[in-house]
Image: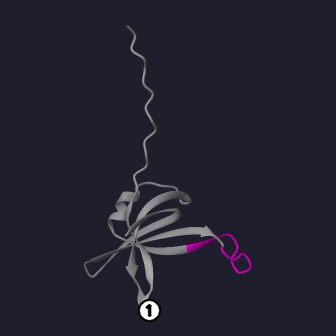
Amino acid sequence: MQMQLIMTVYGVNKITVERDVYCSVFCGQPATDPTVTKGNEVLKMSADPVVFDQVGEFTPGDDIEFIAELKRAAGGKSQPYLVGVVPKKAAPATSKPDSK
């Protein structure tokens, strides 16, 4: 099952450990409990290494739309795993009327 998530992204990193490549996306969301967190809650999400290249250039704090799948996690729980980036839609081209 795949889903699309729009997240405010602060950073993306890729690391190689003994020939295995891992990728993480650091994103944020408004605090769910402002009595214990001020500003944004920063989350680290696991991602497929292709996500690093698909993100391309961005400014920290930009909203990016990802494709995610649920993966099994410890304790019988599940967590989203980012598998790709939804391409940005190009602005519609303005067409010039034919001059006849």
Residue at 42%, 24% (x, y): give it.
Answer: 95
- Give the number of marks: 1
Q: Residue furthest left?
A: 19
The image shows residue 29 at horizontal and vertical percentages of 60, 68
Q: Is residue 73 above or below residue 53?
A: below
Residue at 25%, 78% (x, y): give it.
Answer: 19
Left or right, 51 with respect to 25, comes to left
The image shows residue 34 at horizontal and vertical percentages of 72, 75
Q: Quadrant of residue 3?
A: bottom left
Q: Which residues are magenta?
A: 32-42
Q: Is residue 56 above or below residue 39?
A: above
Magenta residue check for 35? yes
Q: Is residue 47 above or below residue 95?
A: below
The image shows residue 57 at horizontal and vertical percentages of 44, 54
Q: Amino acid at mark 1?
A: Gly
- By secondary structure, the bulk of the magenta-drawn segment is best described as loop
- Which secondary structure, mark 1? helix
Magenta residue check for 90? no
Q: Residue furthest front?
A: 1
Q: Is residue 13 above or below residue 79?
A: above
Quarter of the picture holding the C terminus: top left
Left or right, 32 with respect to 26, comes to right
Q: Quadrant of residue 1?
A: bottom left
Residue at 50%, 70% (x, y): give it.
Answer: 26
Residue receiving disc 1: 75
Pick the residue in front: 46 or 95: 95
Q: Residues within 10 Å of mark 1 (few under 14, many from 20)?
A: few
Residue at 40%, 10% (x, y): give it.
Answer: 99
